[in-house]
Image: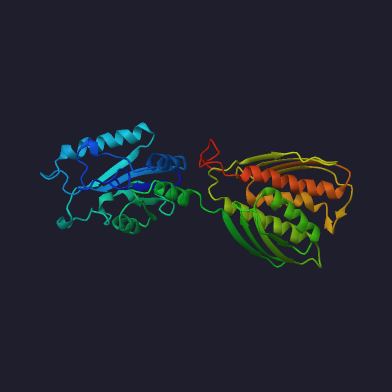
Amino acid sequence: MSAPIRIAFVDRDGTLIKEPADQQVDRLDKVELVPGVIPALLRLKDAGFRFIMISNQDGRGTDSFPEDDFAIPQDFMVRLFASQGICFDEIFVCPHLPADGCDCRKPLPGLLGDFFDRVDVDRQQSLVIGDRETDLGFARNISVPGFLVDPEDADSWNQIVRQVLDQPRSASVNRKTKETDISVTVDLDTSTPVVIDTGIAFYDHMLDQIAKHGGFSLQLSCKGDLEIDEHHTVEDVALALGQALKEALGDKRGIGRFGFVIPMDETQAQVAIDLGGRPFLVFNGDFPRAEVGGMPTELVPHFFRSLSDTLGASIQIEVKGENTHHMVEACFKGTGRALRAALKREGNELPSTKGTL
């Protein structure tokens, strides 16, 4: 089964093209694009949106607004947008006057007819864009978020698209078991604050390396059964962190997806990450000591395996060296640097030929 699609229901006059003083686009010389509309729609298209035009055209087909007077500018406008890569799947036009009392004039939803029965629409992720309160009313009536364009503001369309597509990538996760009580908050688009308290100072330092070198904010606290063992704390923190990162990534559109880094001093660590949705870990490295900073080194690969599981990432790490502290730190630091590249938002396209991650 295919996933529900995201639709941008777009008004015409005052939204796609400027509305003339007489409120009737009945000649070609009246067709004037609203500033910024083409690049904005292209960004929405790249983000996976499909387009539906929906417009009230008072008296279309009557003596006051003959069909040809409507059709010629309309066809020209549709061809103009198509020439720029913007096509409308369907076009709905209400020809009635307010006094006609029809059920298809916005803000009423009747114009769409059986559209939602025919098309599987993701209403939460779709949107209505118009220039009037009636457009917002229409949005409410079809349970889709609505946005208003100011046709005189050259940046209005851009602001709407930024609000829709450049949403903050943050998430909070609370994970409580009999062994641990963990809260995690991440924000992928800011580097501060980074505040970590797991009860294991060395582990805090390692997590700090991931966040700071990954370029994201991390607030994490864990109350674990350290009087018994470090295992539950290390594992559960990794699981909660991976879950928070995955939730913050959302649909992963625009991310780099892949990251690769080789930190070098007397220790060499190679780290490769793929945020492709398939958990997998390859860890090659032998630590000279069984423990560093109160943390068993056998838990280092276990941390990355747990992180991989909930993040949905393939992680490959190879580390060589003589100083155990530096080796462990290189693994965490390298993972942070690889994540920085993989998490970076570079556009709106999904980095996958499969169409999903």
Location of residue 108 by image quarter: bottom left
Q: Which quadrant holds the N terminus?
A: top left
Q: Give me the residue at 46% from left, 40% from top.
A: 46
Position in image of residue 97 (x %, y %) = 17, 53
Location of residue 144 by image quarter: bottom left
Position in image of residue 126 (x %, y %) = 41, 50
Viewer-proximal residue, 184 or 303?
184
The extreme top residue here reads: 83
Q: Which quadrant holds the C terminus?
A: top right
The answer to whether residue 264 is left or right of residue 54 is right
Q: How many labels does the image show?
A: 0
Colour mapping: rainbow
Position in image of residue 44 (x %, y %) = 43, 43
The answer to whether residue 305 is left or right of residue 347 is right
Q: In this view, does 69 lie above or below 132?
A: above
Q: In this view, does 79 lie above or below 18?
A: above
Position in image of residue 47 (x %, y %) = 47, 43
Residue 82 can be seen, yes or no: yes
Residue 1 can be seen, yes or no: no
Q: Give me the residue at 53% from left, 35% from top.
A: 353
Viewer-proximal residue, 86 or 36?
36
The answer to whether residue 313 is left or right of residue 291 is left
